[in-house]
Amino acid sequence: MMWTEDTIAGAILGCVASFFVQGKLLDVAASLNSPFIGALLQWWPLVFIVTGLVVLLRRNSNERPGKSDPLGGGR
C-alpha cells in the first residue's frame, strides 16, 4: 500500500512547515529590499523541487548497469 497514515501525516506536517517558513522568508525579503533575493525567497519551494528532481535523476542515471560497468554485467 502506497499511502499510509505516516505518509499522509508527514505530507501535512511538511505543508504546514512550508507555509510557516514562507511567511518568515517573505518578511526577510521585505527587509532586505533586494529584487533578486526577494524573488528567490518567494520561489524557494520551486527551487527545492527542481533541485530534488535533478539529484534524483542524476542518482538514477548513475545506478544504470551500463554506465558503471563497461561490460554491462551486474552483480
Image (cartoon, rainbow, N blue to C red):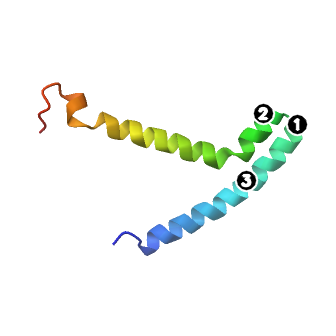
Which of the 4 image quarters holds residue 40?
top right
Residue 74: x and y in percent read 13, 37
Amino acid at circle 1: Asn
Label 2 SS: helix
Q: Earlier in the sequence, mark 1 or mark 3?
A: 3
Residue 26: x and y in percent read 80, 49
Q: Are marks 1 and 2 in contact (CB under 8 Å)?
A: no
Residue 59: x and y in percent read 37, 38
Which residue is under mark 1?
33
Which residue is under mark 2?
36
User: Looking at the image, which residue is at 48% across and 44% down?
Assistant: 53
Which residue is under mark 3?
22
Frontmost residue, 30 versus 49: 49
Amino acid at circle 3: Gln
Tell us which disc is closer to us: 2 or 3.
2
Q: Earlier in the sequence, mark 2 or mark 3?
A: 3
Amino acid at circle 2: Phe
Instruction: Name the image quarter holding the N terminus.
Output: bottom left
| Looking at the image, residue 14 lies above or below residue 64 | below
Viewed as shown, does residue 51 lie left or right of 58? right
User: Looking at the image, which residue is at 41% across and 73% down?
Assistant: 4
Viewed as shown, does residue 68 lie left or right of 59? left
Label 3 SS: helix
Q: How far apart are the alpha carbons under marks 1 and 3?
A: 17 Å
| Looking at the image, residue 56 lies above or below residue 21 | above
